[in-house]
Image (cartoon, rainbow, N blue to C red):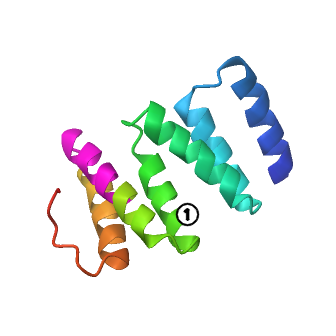
Amino acid sequence: MIKRDRIKLIKEMLSSNSTDPFLNYAAALEYNKIGDKEKSINLLLGIVNNNPEYLGAYYQLGKLYEEQNQSDKAIVIFKKGRKVALEQNNQKTLGELTEALMLVDDEFDGSFD
């Protein structure tokens, strides 16, 4: 399926359920694939703000900020995501976010500040 067709399908599904975090996440990934980083970032920010328990959004948003040379924002997002992963006892995601944070923040000491 062509990427724009996937976006069209996701947008149709979002028209009846605009706050669904999975659909917004899927849309963000598709927009990222076609190079619309701003749209992807905005969708992921919406998820983080409205559905803070949706862990995947933190990693993707942080990586997008990294790509946009916005390391400070990436660090904040990775740290927020780590706290949520710890609360959910999701060790896999905690590890992924910790590794991402270590790569972008030379001063990171592993704490949950």
Look at the numbered disc 1 and give the secondary structure of its residue: helix
Q: Is residue 88 magenta?
A: yes
For the point 65% across and 25% down, the residue is 18
Q: Percent position (x, y) of residue 21? A: 53, 33
Quadrant of the image containing the C terminus: bottom left
The quarter holding residue 73 reads bottom left
Number of marks present in the image shown: 1
Q: Is residue 74 magenta?
A: no
Q: What residue is shown with label 1?
A: 64
Is residue 69 visible in the rendered structure shown here? yes
Residue 43 as seen in the image, left or right of residue 76? right
The correct choice, above or below, for 27 with respect to 11 in the image is below
Q: Percent position (x, y) of residue 92? A: 29, 55
Residue 43 as seen in the image, left or right of residue 31? left
Q: Percent position (x, y) of residue 29? A: 63, 52
Highlighted range, magenta: 78-90
Is residue 1 visible in the rendered structure shown here? no
For the point 69% across and 50% down, the residue is 39
Q: Amino acid at mark 1?
A: Leu
Q: Percent position (x, y) of residue 112? A: 16, 56
